[in-house]
């Protein structure tokens, strides 16, 4: 439990951006492609999804079990297709419970330890949909820490972090342009003196084109971004002496899919390349990873008519099979899968079952 509470409050600072997302009104029609149901690859007016995983041997379902990192889940959606409740379970029981007004509007998270509530995180919003506070508490309702945000209109101007004694310990101030983009960020040491300052630049479309970061008055690094339309093409970070420290280069097909992603890291003198091949529906068929010009890894995928993956095969540079998985699905009348049998290296391993209910 000590480690759970020790999670740095700074991680929560990443949850809020200068441009706040306005919460959806449940009475307003939502574009079906912007719903959480669509994002979760579900069809129809889904109300609940209960997913459970079991061992599967000789055609028979066995004990509750899943692959490493797997969670059984319960999901609940409102009538507009937005997520309202998510629960995750591991071998010890419930591990995590979240409430939402749509996945982008997180209300509350409860983390569990051996089935007992360990930490509760709550998000508060103003009438404009801006996140105004994020508070973490113990199960007994004692404050662990809290972040408060102040806004000018929809633009954030300040964040303050308070410890369990409600004493301010960190502060970040922001300057935003008229479009709501952050143009300057000041991170304080404590609440008195600026430790880190960042300056941001944007083009006419609101794309970030530059970031310059200082530690005190000393330049730490500069990052430049270039675009082709809305597509990010290059991201290059240079150190104080002007040398390239890190770089990313993107290449796209006519549909906007990334077909090549290259990186350079000076610290390790490594040039990496990822090449992707897609089918006509945008599904990835083939991924090839290379380092310094030598192929390291290749993964191939196939899909069924519902765009669910039915096979994964991964090989190394010599062609040795590292991973070989096949998936067989059973579907309901809405083309949502209700059973998935997982075969690993040619042997049945797991069966995952989903109980799905629908809104009228």
Image: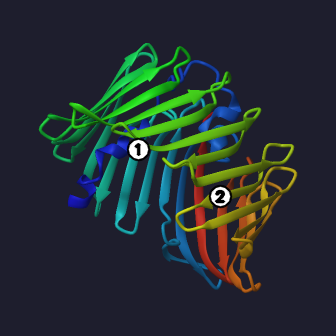
Q: Secondary structure at mark 2?
A: strand
Residue 117 in sight: no
* Residue 240 shows in this picture: yes
Residue drawn at point x = 45 percent, y = 39 percent: 213
Q: Nearer the viewer, residue 351 or 148?
A: 148
Label 1: which secondary element = strand
Q: Residue tagged by mark 2?
A: 263
Looking at the figure, which quarter contains the N terminus? bottom left
Q: Residue at x 65, y 58 (%)?
A: 263
Mark 1 nearby-residue class (10 Å; few <14, some 14–19, many ≥20): many
Q: Look at the image and name its color scheme.
A: rainbow
Disc ID at residue 213:
none
Asked if residue 272 lies left or right of residue 63, the reply is right
Percent across and percent down for residue 323 are 67, 79
**In the rendered picture of this protein, how many numbered marks are placed on residues?**
2
Q: CA distance from mark 1 to mark 2?
A: 36 Å
> Residue 348: image x %, image y %?
65, 81
* Figure quadrant of residue 146: top left
- Of the two numbered discs 1 and 2 in the rendering, the one whose residue sits closer to the viewer: 2
């Amino acid at each position: 439990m000590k480690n759970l509470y020790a999670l740095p409050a700074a991680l929560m600072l990443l949850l809020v951006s200068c441009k706040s997302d306005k919460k959806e009104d449940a009475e307003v029609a939502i574009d079906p492609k912007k719903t959480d149901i669509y994002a979760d690859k579900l069809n129809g007016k889904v109300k609940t999804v209960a997913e459970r995983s079991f061992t599967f041997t000789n055609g028979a379902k066995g004990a509750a079990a899943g692959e490493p990192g797997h969670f059984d889940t319960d999901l609940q959606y409102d009538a507009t297709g937005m997520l309202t409740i998510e629960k995750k379970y591991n071998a010890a029981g419930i591990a995590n419970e979240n409430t939402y007004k749509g996945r982008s509007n997180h209300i509350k998270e409860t983390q569990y330890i051996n089935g007992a509530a360990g930490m509760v995180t709550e998000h508060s919003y103003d009438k404009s949909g801006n996140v105004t506070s994020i508070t973490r508490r113990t199960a007994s309702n004692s404050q662990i820490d809290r972040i408060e945000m102040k806004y000018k209109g929809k633009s954030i101007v300040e964040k303050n972090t308070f410890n369990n004694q409600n004493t301010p310990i960190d502060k970040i101030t922001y300057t935003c342009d008229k479009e709501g983009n952050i143009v300057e960020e000041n991170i304080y040491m404590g609440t008195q003196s600026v430790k880190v300052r960042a300056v941001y630049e944007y083009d006419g479309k609101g794309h970030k084109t530059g970031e310059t970061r200082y530690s005190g008055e000393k330049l730490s690094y500069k990052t430049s971004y270039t675009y082709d339309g809305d597509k990010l093409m290059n991201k290059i970070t240079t150190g104080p002496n002007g040398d390239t420290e890190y770089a990313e280069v993107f290449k796209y097909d006519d549909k906007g899919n990334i077909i090549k992603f290259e990186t350079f890291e000076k610290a390790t003198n490594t040039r990496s390349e990822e090449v992707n091949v897609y089918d006509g529906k945008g599904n990835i068929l083939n991924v090839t990873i290379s380092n310094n010009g030598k192929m390291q890894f290749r993964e191939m995928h196939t899909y069924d008519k519902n765009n669910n993956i039915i096979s994964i095969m991964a090989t190394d540079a010599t062609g040795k099979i590292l991973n070989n998985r096949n998936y067989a699905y059973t579907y309901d009348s809405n083309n949502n899968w209700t059973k998935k049998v997982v075969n690993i290296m040619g042997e049945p391993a797991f069966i995952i079952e989903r109980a799905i209910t629908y809104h009228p």
